[in-house]
Image (tube, coloured by chain):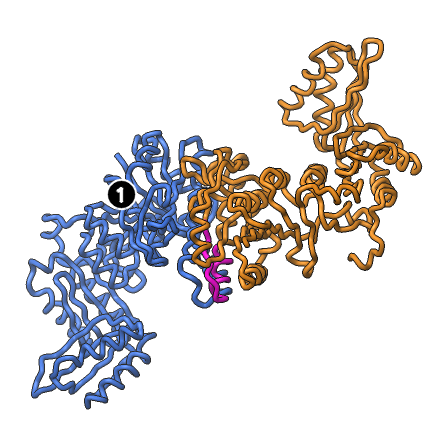
Chain colours: A orange, B blue
Amino acid sequence: MLVVQKYGGTSVRDVQRIQNVARRAIDYKKRGTDVIVVVSAMSGETDRLLSLAQNIAKFPDLRETDVLISTGEQVTSALLAISLIEMGYKAISLLADQIRIISDSTYGFARIASIEEKAVRAKLDEGNIIIVPGFQGVDESGSITTLGRGGSDTTAVALAAGLKADLCEIYTDVDGVYTTDPNICEKARRLDRISYEEMLEMASLGAKVLQIRSVELAQKYNVPILVKSSLIGEGRGTLVCKEERDMMEKVVISGITYNKNEAKITVSRVPDKPGIASKIFTALSEASIVVDMIVQNVSHDGFNDITFTVVKTDARKAFTITKAIGESIGAKVAVDEDMAKVSIVGIGMRSHSGVASKMFSVLAAEGINIQLISTSEIKISCVIESKYGELAVRALHTNFGLDAEDVTEEA
Amino acid sequence: MLVVQKYGGTSVRDVQRIQNVARRAIDYKKRGTDVIVVVSAMSGETDRLLSLAQNIAKFPDLRETDVLISTGEQVTSALLAISLIEMGYKAISLLADQIRIISDSTYGFARIASIEEKAVRAKLDEGNIIIVPGFQGVDESGSITTLGRGGSDTTAVALAAGLKADLCEIYTDVDGVYTTDPNICEKARRLDRISYEEMLEMASLGAKVLQIRSVELAQKYNVPILVKSSLIGEGRGTLVCKEERDMMEKVVISGITYNKNEAKITVSRVPDKPGIASKIFTALSEASIVVDMIVQNVSHDGFNDITFTVVKTDARKAFTITKAIGESIGAKVAVDEDMAKVSIVGIGMRSHSGVASKMFSVLAAEGINIQLISTSEIKISCVIESKYGELAVRALHTNFGLDAEDVTEEA
């Protein structure tokens, strides 16, 4: 059996925690399981290194920034190997170029192209616990690359896929994936299991437990991921895995996500001619504004309404750009900066009708007006006034049967 | 023309100094000279990393310690490259595995076996200033190695040799090699030139300007080294180069070195039988005690006297070991912990007789008793009582004509 474990920055914050990580790896080794440990930089280290670079240049060279920040994970790797060896176990750190974690050359946001099994397998077979610095690769020319924030999750899943591991454990500072944000809804409940698809919708909607790319990769290679806390005792965590039939039958909705940093821009009385929407969204894209939801109403008497959302901090900029284009074609443009998006996610809704109408009824019963609706196969999102956001989450959580039966038991 | 520059830890202590280093490299580039810059870790960084490891293990695994501490130079390299690029120049950092600085696998004290020219040459030809982290290599298996403290000098000289550079500049916190320690003798004078051989004798005797291995390497490949300060203005520094005829004719003595941390151990009335000396020095070596001078007097009436010196901190341990062996064969063992060694170094003494006798006369005139004498081809060392050490240096400096003519002019 082979397990890949990944520990985030807070789990390796200091020497004591690194030694705790060593003990967890040893627990597996003692039971005869091979272990690969992927580590992040000690918390704060990546920021410290980046600030050095930013003292020199506002936009430091990307290739050299990767050479710089990749040292963070390298330091943790060496310290963990030293800890394991000191505890009497065989261990070796292998860097991206030694394993051959080959990526493209998009420094700062590189994507893994391939992982060679040979070097790691050989060292495993010699009885070593393998330690790999997360978040980094090497391109064809041999230059160091990094995979972007959270890239260590991707390293772990990619290694698990490449070495056909039985399980990929992601240790983080929460003890699993919750039905919704426990800070908003005290009845939030840890999920024992969630499907890749649901996790993807949850992650992209703001449940920042796993890097989205790592979930995509896990889904592609069918790597089961166990999300656990390395700090809060020995919780069971949440298993992110393939959708299973009996899972689907039981639960309609797996979770509720919530994002209150939304702004809504409405372009009304848009002449119903091809190319107008394209013009607006091309201009926004060129200004590096990420547009989230886009809704266009059915045209009536030759005019359309187009509404879209952006993150609040981009609202003013997006409004100015949209206004210029909108007014040039005689449309009216309005912005509302105090919006929240509430979404329900669940594979079960595929086979259950009436989920959407139930959501709308629950919100209506609380007197919450829905401004915008958008749906995907396993998700329904509603944009509402920001002030109702938390109320909406709690009401939906209860009405979709997600509430924990006894809060103290789960806490 | 190609110049290799090396900057020590204090020269890259912070972002401002790293930017100063960038400007020095650019000065050459502007004049059409290709530049390779070798950098150390920012001062204090190697110790910070080592202390992390030592919090985990008293003797941290050597391979992993190299993975750990090599990040120090990597960080400086990236920051220097970022600085150069920000200033509008093409620059690229190349790590040991990218260049192929191949070393043996003696982690912590590896020796460079070979350096490939190809990768560096290709990047130079594209107009880049090349930055190389000093002090590290990669072994045949691809593992990171380090070359031991001061190894960055060796990296610089090895690169200069491998790429047939015209000059290797070593920037440090002193502005060159002095005739003696300016802290002891205010008339000490910076040397414009010194031969490799003299430098080797000076370095091993305590003039800690250049790592001894780098001088040996420079001598082997005939790489001229210019030792300069990166801090004290634009001094001319000292050129360490091949012995030249006219140089030899002018100066008899190039410098005087001084080491006050010596202890002397005397074993008297040693039976004149083979194997006794071997027994003593094998035991000392097994206890990791480094013996400096060894003097054995001509045997008289079947007995010898053996005297040797060790560093003061090893004196007690060495005495205990030697006493046990000495007394088992009926010899007497004594220790004196307050010794200093004063040496005069100069290629000129090869062709000048009377240098030794002059040294002894100068010391005698000051009332200094010589306890031990040892000579090599270009060096004469005398062990004297510690309290006379500084007086001896000053007297020799004056009498061998080394005094600066006008101290203020040189300061």
Q: Is A297 located above or below residue B387 in the figure?
A: above
Of residue B218 and residue A254, the one placed in the foreground of this image is A254
Q: The N terminus of chain B is located in which quarter? A: top left
Q: State which chain disc 1 sits on.
A: B
Give how far across and how far down residue B273 sits, in percent. Answer: 12, 83
Residue nearest the observer in this picture, B39 or B283: B283
Q: Which residues are magenta?
A: A78-94
Name the residue tied to disc 1: B160
The residue shown at (22%, 79%) is B280
Query: From this viewpoint, is residue B10 visible?
Result: no
Percent of width and height locating residue A362? 89, 37
Q: Position of residue A87 (x, y in %)?
A: 50, 66
Say which quarter of the image contains residue A247: top right
Q: Position of residue B300 (x, y in %)?
A: 8, 85
Viewed as shown, does residue B262 lie left or right of B400?
A: right
Name which residue lies at 56% across and 59% down: A25
The residue drawn where x is 19% and y is 50% is: B220
Q: Is residue A237 left or right of residue A73?
A: right
| Residue A328 magenta-highlighted | no
Q: Is residue A110 left or right of residue A368?
A: left
Circle 1: element type:
helix
